[in-house]
Amino acid sequence: MTLLRRASSHYQATARPSPRRGALSGTETCDVCVVGGGIAGCSTALHLAERGYRVVLLEEHRIGWGASGRSGGQALAGTAAGQAELERLIGRDDARAVWDISVEGLELIRALIARHGIACDWVSGQMQVAITPRHDAELRALLETHRQYGYAGARYLSRGEVRAVLATRRYIAGLYDPSGGHLHPLNYTLGLAAAAESRGARIFERTRALDFADDAEVRVRTASGTVLCRHLALCGNASLGATAPPLRSKIMAVGSCVVATAPLDAARAHRLITNDAAVSDLNWVLDYFRLTADHRLLFGGRVTYSGFDPSRIAATTRRRLLAVFPQLGDVEIEHAWGGYLDITANRAPHFGRLAPNVYFLQGFSGHGIALAGIAGKLLAEAVAGHAERFDVFARIPHADFPGGPLLRRPALVLAMLYYRLRDLLG
């Protein structure tokens, strides 16, 4: 059996047609310059354009090139930090506000898809599953948080109920949320960009924002031009790098790997996940999986620090896949890819300002499908003078990753090894 048929992303292979946009040349003037063409940047551009602002968006590669077009495509409420940690950091009222905004983020996905006719294979339903008794206790605590916050709909699943839905014996409990779901993240991002352009936003691809100066107006410099603007929105996340040095110490780029199997027949695919939900476990180095619209199993996880060799991704991720679904031993891996996501030290999202008119969004820590979209709406509100909801997130404190530029990644590797050991010990 061939281990890997195609060294490419399933999303790239099934992407909707998208125009190739030119690079910036010369000087452009606008109200707001947005840096980054992922979900956060495209949502920001769309919501600003809908408010009547003149918007220029700069993307170093192509729209959806980064984490937004490579992820597992799962949308769920909350943040990676968890509500207990947020309550400790910013108090119960603000933590509740963050939760409510994240729930609104799920509603926003469905609204944007419907309003702009975005064909991105949205499917409702997301499950978090427990491997150990500690995970089970975490699920029960999360359900209690739902109750306290008045969030109805999520349902606890016993071992038997989980095994009736998933064709695996790996999990002992689950929490099913019908408001979550999954989608084709690249097509969703491309749809947001097209919607922003339809409202008048101008998008330049293959244009990296090298740096910026905040004087009477903001001047954003690129290799072949300049953008002059009243406001700047930095949405480059893990790819922003030297464009905004003060932000670099607050996030770490971590590589995650994903595979997609060859297509299964519809009945066999349905037997794997009978409710067609997106699924993720509660390990620190988690596994996540779902079915695609063409009946493949898409399976991701495994943190990497050494690049993305597709053959190695296929081999190592396939072993994880077979630990969950050993009955797929005869199924080939057709696509294998990876990408970097940005995490913060406390795994809470990091929003704020570098100057009164320079905003940033980063640190989604694996929850970007829902959070990045609503973050763009909050940033547009803040530019328009209604910053109350944006400032709830801006109040979350964030420490630098330890170790400085040379030692911070080795320190993170050691931390991840600790959490991986904790996962193995239960």
Image (spheres, rainbow, N blue to C red):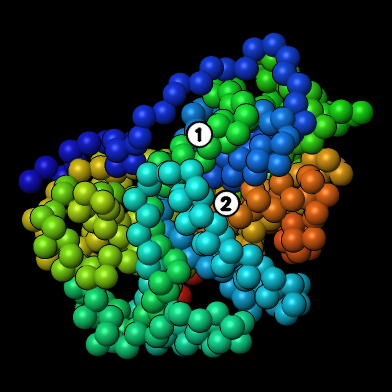
Q: Amino acid at mark 1?
A: Ala
**Residue tagged by mark 2?**
373
Q: Is residue 6 above or below residue 174?
A: above
Q: Secondary structure at mark 2?
A: helix
Q: Amino acid at mark 2?
A: Gly
How many numbered tags mark residues here?
2
Q: Is residue 163 above or below residue 41?
A: below
**Residue tagged by mark 1?**
194
Q: Residues within 10 Å of mark 2 (few under 14, many from 20)?
A: many
Quarter that holds the C terminus = bottom left
Q: Of 135 and 420, which appears nearest the observer?
A: 135
Q: Secondary structure at mark 1?
A: helix
Give residue 285's position: percent from left, percent from top: 43, 64
Q: Can you tell which mark lies on residue 5?
A: none
What is the C-alpha distance between the residues marked 2 and 1?
Answer: 15 Å
Closest to the camera, between mark 2 and mark 1, is 1
